[in-house]
Amino acid sequence: MVTGLRVLAVDDEQPALEDLAYLLRADPRIGDVLTARDGAAALKLLDRAMADGRPVEAVFLDIRMRGLDGVVLGRLLTRFTRPPKIVFVTAYDDHAVDAFELKAEDYLLKPVRPERLAEAIRRVCGSRTDSPEGQEVDTIPVELGGVTRFVASTEVRYVEAQGDYARLHTATGSHLVRIPLATLEERWATAGFLRVHRSHLVAVKHIDELHIDSGKCVVRVGETEIPVSRRHTRELRDLLVRRARRAKRDG
C-alpha cells in the first residue's frame, strides 16, 4: 500500500502556517503534515521523525523567520544523511539563487495559489528522476514578468556566459540568470552538459553537427554555431563518436 508524503511546513506567522498546512492536507498525494513555528522547532521535529523511523520527505519552508531563517535551515537540511526535499514558500522573490544553490524543488511566492502548490508537490513526488536518456533532471529559477518559475535542465540547449551571469537558451527563448557558468558546469555535469569553451556550456543531446576546419572546431545547435576551444575538441569529438556508436547499436 502506497502512503502519501510526510511533510513539514515551517513558518513563523501562525495564519500563514495554518493556510499552508490546510492546502497541503487537501492534496491527495500528502499524508502527514507536521508544522513548526521556527527553525529550531523544525529541527527537533525532523530529529524525532527520524528516530521514530518515519522521516519527513519534504519541507515547505518560509525564508524570513525570526531566529534561524529558512536559507540557513535549508543549508542544515542538505547535510542530513537523507535530506528532505525543500520547497521555499516566501513573500520575497530575492532568494531564488539561494533556492537553486540548495537544490530546492520549487520556490513559491505568497499568497500561495493552490495550483502552484500542486505543481510544487508534483515536483517533489517526481524530482530527481531520470530522463528518457538516463540524464538527471534539474531545475533553475528564472524571472518572467515578475513571476519566478523553474526551467528544467532538459529544456536548455546551451548556456552562454555573460560576466557573472549566464544566459540559458531553450527552444522558445532565452533567460538571463545570476549564476556563473562554472557553477552550472558543476551542477549539470550529470545532466548531459559539457563545457566546450570558456563562455559556452552545451547539452550534448542537442548538438546537430560538429565541424573542424583548419584546426578550428564549432558545433551547431539548431541554427546557432558555437565555438569549441582546442583543449575541449578531442573530448567532445570522442564523446560524440561514442554516442553515435551507442545509438547505432541500440537502434
Image: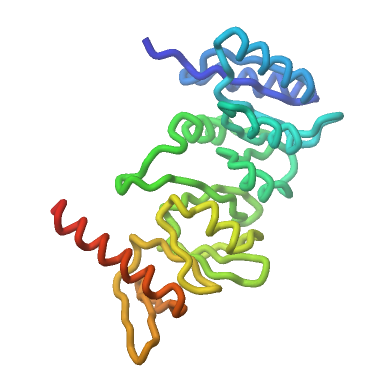
Residue at image location 43% in from the left, 33% down from the top: 126
Quarter of the C terminus within the rendering: bottom left
Residue 242's place in the image compared with 52, above or below, is below
Q: Which residue lies furthest to the bottom in this view?
A: 214
Residue at image location 52% in from the left, 63% down from the top: 168
Residue 97: where, in percent of width, then height? 67, 50
225 and 115: which is toward the camera: 225
Q: Taking the image as drawn, is residue 173 in sight? A: no
Which quarter of the picture shows residue 182?
bottom right
Residue 52: where, in percent of width, then height? 60, 7
Residue 197's place in the image compared with 245, above or below, is below
Which quarter of the picture shows residue 224?
bottom left
Q: Taking the image as drawn, is residue 197 in sight? A: yes
Left or right, 29 with respect to 43, comes to: left
Residue at image location 32% in from the left, 64% down from the top: 239
251 and 37: which is toward the camera: 251
Residue at image location 61% in from the left, 34% down from the top: 87
